Amino acid sequence: MMNAFLRKIKQPVLPEFRLPTESEWEYAARAGSEGKYSFGDNISLLETYAWLKTNTVDKGLWGAKTVSSKKANNWGLHDLYGNVMEWVQNYYKPNYFASVRQSDNSNDLNVPENEEYPLRVVRGGAWGGLHGAGTPEGLRSAKRYAFVEWTRSFQIGFRCAMDIPVKN
């Protein structure tokens, strides 16, 4: 809406921010790694990169922590594992992994399977372990959770993405 107004009065248009798609989120989380995490499969390194149940709740520390207080992944992104789960654009589809890499992907990820109970995807795990989200398994790059889109929780947040126009 703001960008339409700025175009009308011929002012520079601000970048449009949005939630990342599920595949964009996972690509950023992996940062080139094919392992369970951006740093590989060594679970002993997880607390270096993430706030999870073992370094929060189990130590009597409750709540989300300051962003970037843990080590960044190889692309400089912080807090993709733990701290809070992150909403993504996509609606939940149980067959997501089977269809996401197909060139003829007709699995419309922007339409809920059930209009009355629309499930959206959250990724990344959380500090407190809601639905196992604070466990090493719950923080894996490929782990998905689904919540109705009106869910409000102190363990769910979001990350912004921005499209960068390609200059010809």
Image: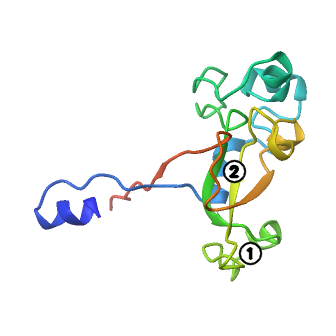
Could you say where residue 168 lies in the image, as x and y percent from the top left? Answer: 33, 62
Q: Counting other residues with Cα less than 10 Å from the Cα at mark 1, is it few (<14), some (14-19), or many (20 or more)?
A: few
Could you say where residue 67 lies in the image, as x and y percent from the top left? Answer: 57, 27
CB atoms at circles 1 and 2 under 8 Å apart?
A: no
Of residue 101 and residue 118, the one placed in the foreground of this image is 118
As shown in the figure, which amino acid type bears the numbered disc 1? Gln
- Return the disc, 1 or 2, that comes first in the chain's sequence: 2
Residue sitting at x 55%, y 45%: 159
Of residue 155 and residue 90, the one placed in the foreground of this image is 155
Asked whether residue 36 appears in the rendered view, the answer is: no
Question: Residue 65 vs residue 61: left or right?
Answer: left
Q: Which residue is mark 2?
A: 26
In the picture shown, does residue 105 fall above or below 97? below
Q: Quadrant of residue 16?
A: bottom left
CA gap, disc 1 and disc 2: 17 Å
Q: Secondary structure at mark 2?
A: helix
Q: Quadrant of the N terminus?
A: bottom left
In the displayed orientation, state which residue is furthest to the top.
59
Of residue 114 and residue 87, the one placed in the foreground of this image is 114
Residue sitting at x 80%, y 66%: 97
As shown in the figure, which amino acid type bears the numbered disc 2? Glu
Q: Secondary structure at mark 1?
A: loop
Residue sitting at x 53%, y 55%: 19
Q: Counting other residues with Cα less than 10 Å from the Cα at mark 2, is it few (<14), some (14-19), or many (20 or more)?
A: many
Q: Quadrant of residue 33?
A: top right
Question: Residue 91 vs residue 128: left or right?
Answer: left
In the picture shown, does residue 27 fall above or below 166? above
Q: Which residue is mark 1?
A: 102
